[in-house]
């Protein structure tokens, strides 16, 4: 055996060690998830993730392969998150609720923490139509837009482990609710009219509030929609005076209990 063949053999041995280590690591991830579930511990622990990253940074500080190894570990972390997501959710999570309830914020956080695909329905429809949502309404009418929502919800049923953030009016249409249920679990995020107002008052991308941006108008609209929202929802999570982490932990806990 010449030197080149010896190096290749050593490389193959290293690859085998990496595979065995990754299998062991993934099994440990599943054990951690089971332990957290058994003892009612929080699933999301960003502080622990930050601690692990700090440890890795310190270990690689003077390593000449630091950048390459960091890149590999970033992929390992994403795969760990996917393992967690598959264990927790064998379905899509559909977020509904009034504007300003926190759908986009929570969808983005869950997507990041579990490396789940994120679909912002309004943005997806706007991109496909190459028009803003207000322009779609003005040009083609609400019925046309709702049909686009229904078709997109049907399309998304082919996948799993996806976070779907719906527009505020999506759950008001019965056909949409039927398709949401086929996707997986429907989560209603809600908040008080006062909280909603504080979150949306400075925005200019809410056509429904043009000329009507007040707590009273929001309260009236929310009450008109409340029954349909609640009928569509599998679980309800109040978002007033809670951190993003608290909201997501409550959401995960309620979904886990529902699947029970």
Image: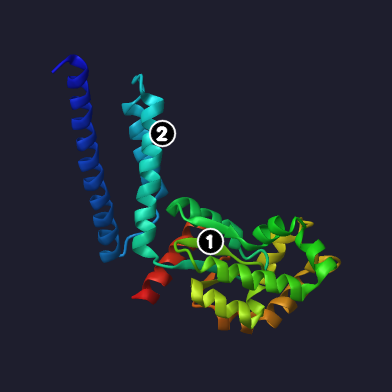
Q: From where the camera sits, is residue 185 visible? A: no
Secondary structure under tag 1 reads loop
Quadrant of the drawing holding the C terminus: bottom left
From this viewpoint, which residue is outermost toward the front? 1
- The image quarter containing residue 72 is top left
How crowded is the residue under tag 2: few (<14 C-alpha within 10 Å), some, or many (20+)? few
Q: CA distance from mark 1 to mark 2?
A: 34 Å
Give percent across and percent down for residue 20: 20, 42
With 184 as the anchor, is 25 left or right in this view?
Answer: left
From this viewpoint, which residue is outermost toward the top? 3
User: Residue placed at 41% from the left, 33% from the top?
Assistant: 71
- The image quarter containing residue 102 is bottom right
Question: In the rendered image, which residue does mark 2 sit on?
Answer: 71
Judge whether 241 appears above or below 28 on screen: below
Question: Total marks drawn?
Answer: 2
Question: In the rendered image, which residue does mark 1 sit on?
Answer: 242
């Amino acid at each position: 055996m010449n030197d080149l063949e010896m190096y290749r053999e050593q490389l193959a041995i290293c690859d085998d060690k990496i595979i065995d280590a990754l299998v062991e690591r993934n099994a440990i991830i599943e054990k951690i998830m089971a332990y957290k579930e058994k003892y009612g511990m929080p699933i999301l622990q960003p502080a622990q993730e930050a601690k692990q990253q700090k440890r890795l940074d310190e270990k690689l500080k003077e390593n000449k392969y630091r950048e390459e190894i960091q890149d590999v570990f970033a992929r390992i972390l994403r795969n760990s998150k996917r393992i967690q997501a598959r264990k927790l959710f064998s379905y899509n999570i559909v977020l509904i609720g009034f504007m300003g309830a926190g759908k986009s914020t929570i969808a983005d956080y869950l997507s990041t923490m579990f490396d789940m695909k994120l679909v912002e329905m309004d943005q997806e429809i706007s991109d496909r139509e190459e028009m803003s949502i207000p322009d779609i309404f003005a040009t083609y009418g609400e019925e046309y837009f709702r049909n686009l929502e229904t078709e997109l919800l049907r399309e998304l049923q082919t996948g799993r482990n996806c976070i779907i953030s719906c527009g505020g009016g999506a759950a008001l249409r019965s056909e949409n609710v039927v398709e949401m249920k086929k996707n997986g679990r429907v989560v209603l995020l809600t908040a008080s009219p006062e909280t909603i107002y504080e979150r949306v008052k400075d925005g200019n991308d809410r056509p429904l509030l043009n000329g009507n941006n007040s707590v009273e108008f929001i309260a009236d609209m929310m009450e008109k929609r409340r029954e349909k929202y609640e009928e569509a929802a599998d679980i309800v999570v109040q978002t007033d005076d809670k951190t993003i982490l608290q909201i997501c932990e409550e959401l995960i806990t309620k979904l886990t209990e529902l699947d029970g």
